[in-house]
Amino acid sequence: MTQGELSHKEDVRNLSFEDLKRYLEGAGEKSFRADQVFEWIYQKGAWSFDGMSNLPKPLRDRLARDFYCRPFVSVQKQVSPEGTTKFLFELNDHEKIESVLIPAQGRATACVSTQAGCKFGCKFCASGVGGWVRNLTCAEIVTQVLGVREESLKHKKPLTNIVFMGTGEPLDNFENLMAAIRIINSDKGMNIGARHMTVSTAGLIPGMKELAQAGLQVELAVSLHGYDDETRSFLMPVNKKYPLKELMAACLEYIRETNRQITFEYILIRNLTCTEKAARALGKLLKGMLCKMNLIPYNPVPEFDYEPPNKLELLAFTTRLSQLGIHATVRMPRGREVQAACGQLRQGPTPPRAHGPGRVSPARPYGRRGQRVPRGRRV
Ligand code: SF4
């Protein structure tokens, strides 16, 4: 399909089930045709209208005239020894986004992007290096999940979990995120339970408030990464707009409204975020809160002058948190071999390092390189 042909058509995956039903009824079709089209796209994984064999040919032609449902072009794919697979997908406007398949025993997780680039510029993150380009559409979010699921099924692993922890700030693209979640969650769509989806945020308070009101049972992960305003503003400039005190108040409100636990993502940087001072501050900050912490040892790259803690420091920090009543688990970054830290593929290759990733050459280089702390629970 040429760019010209695409420009006057809409991606059918931007339509909710109700939208599609309205369109089909407007075309004089019975409403059950919407069930059939949704089933083909989201359950059978169809990538064109041609193969929708139980639809009459004139309807297939009409759908193909008004819409498309093609897959993304995968311009790069890297697979780690443990099976973590990272895709660099190209969008219609040639922007590139990253999605990751993370297999585990009997299940698999898709980590997907919600924006092309990111405007929040966290100090440890490659996704923010090139700045923000645009929001992804609902279709672009859902199509990543479909593409990752296809790969997952090739390995006979059902796709069971979705984490919105790829490039971009999900709550900065709220409407499209919600539309995608509804399709993924719907029994007419991909039928993945809301509790199996995790929305991550850098701490956008208005978005957290909206999410609390959305009535979805999705998990919320807040990227904390600093133990006071000074460290957090240094690592995450968004903290200047939404400082810790306000963020913690918003978290408490979210828990009150939803009765759901929050997960705090926390990067471990030697002599900076995992000191005794940090542990004590975290103890005060999170005291009594319905939450848990994911501790993520920093994954070193040449661009940033940080180091992860050694094993003893890590043990000392986790023990201290436990003494302070904080339930914390350490999540070792998976997929180092595939530059699975978000934003790395999009930014281009990292030079070889002693413990660094093995790589596939990218289609074209993208300027500065960096690393993003993976925000996914199991990334
Ligand atoms: S960590 Fe998240 S919010 Fe921060 S720059 Fe990266 S993608 Fe953006």
Image (tube, grey):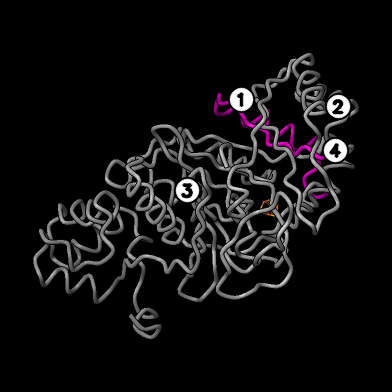
Q: Is residue 68 left or right of residue 246?
A: left
Residue at the location (72% across, 17% down)?
Answer: 288
Task: Please state the horizontal and vertical placement of residue 107, each as a whole percent of the image.
Answer: 40, 35
Label 2 environment density (alpha carbons within 10 Å; few <14, some 14–19, many ≥20): some
Number of numbered discs overlaid on the protein picture: 4
Tag nearer the camera, 2 or 4: 4
In the rendered structure, does residue 163 fall within the stretch colored magenta?
no
* Mark 1 crowdedness (10 Å alpha carbons): few <14, some 14-19, many ≥20: few
Residue at 24% of width from left, 77% of height from top? 65
Sequence-first disc among 3 and 1: 3
* Disc 3 secondary structure class: strand
Q: Which residue is mark 3?
A: 101
Q: Does residue 179 appear left or right of residue 268 in this picture?
A: left
- Sequence-wise, which precedes: disc 4 or disc 3? 3
Task: Give the CA distance from mark 4 to mark 3.
Answer: 29 Å
Tell me, yes or no, if residue 35 can be seen here: yes
Which stretch is magenta? 240-269
Where is residue 221? Give x, y as percent.
61, 37
> Which residue, given by chain and number where applicable, does mark 2 sit on?
281
Question: Of residues 108 and 120, which is closer to you in this image?
Answer: 108
Residues under labels 2 and 1: Cα distance?
Answer: 23 Å
Mark 4 burial class by Cα count in 10 Å: few <14, some 14-19, many 20+: some
Marks 2 and 4, the one that precedes in the sequence: 4
Q: Earlier in the sequence, mark 1 or mark 4?
A: 1
Q: Name the disc covering residue 256, or none.
A: 1
Left or right: 168 as drawn, with respect to 247: left
- The residue to which callout 4 is attached is 270
